[in-house]
Amino acid sequence: TNVDKVKKILVELAKRHLLILKHPEPQAFLIAFTDKGIRFSLVYKVADYKDEFRTQEELRCEIEKKFQAEKIEMALPQMVVHLKGEKQ
């Protein structure tokens, strides 16, 4: 299923990251079905806390690239902006 595919991708990307510890192994969980999409959580450990934010950013970038390549769409918030003084 698509859920299994997403979880597999998340875990594979985490396992390949150099700063993520091999033990305990990274795990992906389906957290919730929401009105905006499906929420997942990726759980992993790094050896040094100072690397956590860099690791998160690098993983997010890799996830976004992989999802694009696999044609997996992410639900992104949308907003309608009305400008004062413009005719509608």
Image (spheres, rainbow, N blue to C red):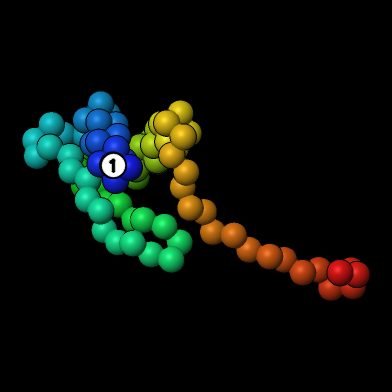
Query: Residue at point 52% right, 54% down?
Result: 76
Image location (x, y in percent) of residue 65: 45, 32
Q: Quadrant of residue 31?
A: bottom left
SS for dot 1: loop
Instruction: Specify the amino acid type for callout 1.
Output: Thr
Query: Residue at point 21% right, 30% down?
Result: 15
Residue under label 1, please give it. Answer: 1
Query: Residue at point 25% right, 53% down?
Result: 30
Query: Residue at point 17% right, 39% down?
Result: 26
Please indicate, yes or no, whether residue 19 appears anywhere in the rendered image.
no
Question: In the figure, is residue 42 to the left or right of 21?
Answer: right
- Residue ranking furthest to the front: 1
Looking at the picture, tell me which residue is in the foreground, 25 or 48.
Answer: 25
Question: In the figure, is residue 82 to the left or right of 73?
Answer: right
Quadrant occupied by the N terminus = top left
Image location (x, y in percent) of residue 14: 25, 34
Q: Quadrant of residue 72?
A: top left
Image location (x, y in percent) of residue 63: 39, 37
Please indicate, yes or no, whether residue 30 appears anywhere in the rendered image.
yes
Decide: is 16 above or below 59: above
Question: In the figure, is residue 3 to the left or right of 62?
Answer: left
Q: Quadrant of residue 77?
A: bottom right
- Residue ranking furthest to the bottom: 84
